[in-house]
Image (cartoon, rainbow, N blue to C red):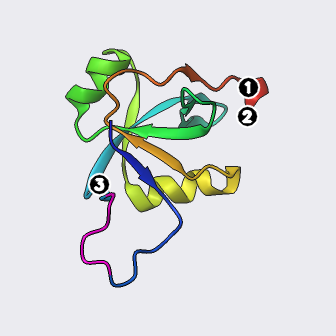
């Protein structure tokens, strides 16, 4: 499963070790008081992360056909979760991350 890290710029490195996804990402969401909010997860080691998929089919295969989602560009997704201190982004995981964040874990 590719994992994209935020933070360091690669400077003059013509081929960064990790590539950032281009274009639209399918981002799982959950109901909130005034619409929807991005669904947050924890990695197997406990780090908070957002999850996104490159196609709706990949999202459905991992999270199920009933999982609501929205289309966001990678910079927009990062901007939404940055105020929460989350810089992890897991793209196209082969299975669902270990556990979704509960209200008490946010």
Q: CA distance from mark 1 to mark 3?
A: 29 Å
CB-based contact (under 8 Å), mark 1 and mark 3: no
Seen from this angle, which residue lies furthest right? 104
User: x, y (%) of residue 69?
Assistant: 39, 33
Query: What secondary structure is the magenta-colored segment mainly?
Result: loop
x and y, in percent, of residue 104 in the image: 78, 25
Mark carried by residue 21: 3
Position of residue 79 measured from the top left corner of the image (x, y, whole percent): 54, 60
Task: Please determine whether, in this image, residue 59 is positioned above or below residue 82.
Answer: above
Residue drawn at (58%, 23%) of the image: 100
Direction from residue 2 to residue 8 in the image, left or right: right
Q: Nearer the viewer, residue 50 or 3?
A: 3
Tell me, yes or no, whether the two marked residues, 2 and 1, touch with CB atoms within 8 Å: yes
The answer to whether 27 is drawn above or below residue 76 in the figure is above
- Pick out the residue farthest to the bottom: 12
Q: CA distance from mark 2 to mark 1?
A: 6 Å
Q: Is residue 9 above or below residue 71?
A: below
Residue 103 disc label = 1
Mark 3 lies on a secondary structure that is: loop
Q: Secondary structure at mark 2?
A: loop
Residue 90 sits in which quadrant? Answer: top left
What's drawn in magenta, residue-wise?
A: 13-18
Q: State the image quarter where residue 75 is shown.
A: bottom left
Query: Disc 3 to disc 2, how far (Cα)?
Result: 26 Å
Element type at mark 1: helix
Q: Which mark is first along the chain, 2 or 3? A: 3
Identify residue for label 2: 106
Quarter where residue 47 is shown: top right
Mark 1 or mark 3, whichever is nearer to me:
3
């Amino acid at each position: 499963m590719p994992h994209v890290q935020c933070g360091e710029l690669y400077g003059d490195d013509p081929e960064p070790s990790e590539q950032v996804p281009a274009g639209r990402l399918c981002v799982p969401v959950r109901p909130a008081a005034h619409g929807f909010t991005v669904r947050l997860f924890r990695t197997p080691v406990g780090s908070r992360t957002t999850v996104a998929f490159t196609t709706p089919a990949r999202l459905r295969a991992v999270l199920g056909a009933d999982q609501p989602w929205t289309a966001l560009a990678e910079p927009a997704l990062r901007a939404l979760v940055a105020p929460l201190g989350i810089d992890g982004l897991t793209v196209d995981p082969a299975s669902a991350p270990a556990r979704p964040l509960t209200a008490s874990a946010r």
